[in-house]
Image (cartoon, grey):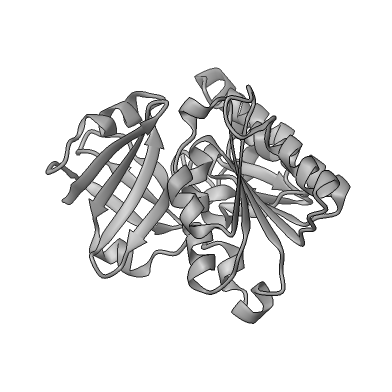
Amino acid sequence: MFKILKKEYLANNIWLMDIEAPRVAKSCKPGQFVIVKADERGERIPLTICDYDREKGIVTIVFQVVGVGTQELQKYEVGDSYMDFVGPLGNASELIEMPVEELKKEHILFVCGGVGTAPVYPQVKWMKEHGIGVDVIIGARTKDIMILENEMREVAENLYVATDDGSYGFKGNGCDQINDLVGNQGKTYTRVVAIGPMIMMKFVAKLTKELGIPTIVSMNPIMVDGTGMCGACRLQVGDEVKFACVDGPEFDGHLVDFDQAMKRQAMYKSEEGLAKLRYEEGETHHGGCGNCD
């Protein structure tokens, strides 16, 4: 059992929880995720890791209540325990696998939106701990639904906030802020990391491709099973078929076919759509087992 040590409402039906999970905390890295199951009848829910404390054995998760599974997670209070908390899963961010001295030569910009701010935070925190300063853009429709601003401000070298309605910070979306930084403020970046809603990552990647800036995106929004067996997170990356939960969740944003990924995600919401995808994609529909029912 995995005890809930902290529960905090952030905004927009988004919750933060500290979970007592020593084994996961001991080995997890920025970019990875866990699968949480409330009880024996609960849904298996993949959630990215927002933070961790190896010494205290604590893992922090952030999730938005959008369906029955996350609604069930939200019902649990401090002192209660989840039945399963499995991880770390997926691959760590490719940036933290690079030599630190090489990273220090880079000029990195993180762009995050919505719940995507949560998986960006541990990467930026890791960068600061290793003496690497990075810029961060947090985007939201309005100030009221922005999360983790104070935490991000403590670890980013420069933090830029942008709201679609102009209620806080820069008026515009993440792409508008990038254009302002590069076009008006003379900023130069060697790499961009974008994490958030798929539509946001699509347009950030489109812009950075035009600007000639290599870009990493995290495809965690399309994960369902978390083990590569359900086929939900199948996506086209260049000439290759990949599965976000086992091959990612990070990929080259300029190679990801976002239109296909978003179409598949919409179709996966119905049994008829799922059956059609299984028929069209055949054996490549699946990941881990390749041919499960």
Q: Is residue 77 visible to the viewer in this orientation of the structure?
A: yes
Q: Is residue 228 above or below residue 267?
A: below
Horizontal and vertical percent position of residue 108: 68, 60
Position of 125 compared to 57: left or right?
right
Horizontal and vertical percent position of residue 119: 49, 50
Q: Residue furthest left?
A: 79
Tally of marks: 0
Horizontal and vertical percent position of residue 242: 64, 51
Query: Image point 41% across, 51% down: which residue?
Result: 50
Position of 267 compared to 205: left or right?
left
Please tell me in which quadrant of the rendered image residue 170 appears.
Answer: top right
Position of 253 compared to 62: left or right?
right
Q: Nearer the viewer, residue 265 or 272?
A: 265
Query: Image point 53% across, 45% down: which residue?
Result: 291
Horizontal and vertical percent position of residue 45: 37, 39
Q: Nearer the viewer, residue 152 or 86?
A: 152
Q: Is residue 289 visible to the viewer in this orientation of the structure?
A: no
Q: Is residue 7 above or below residue 23?
A: above
Query: Image point 71% across, 33% down: which residue?
Result: 260
Q: Is residue 99 above or below residue 287?
A: below
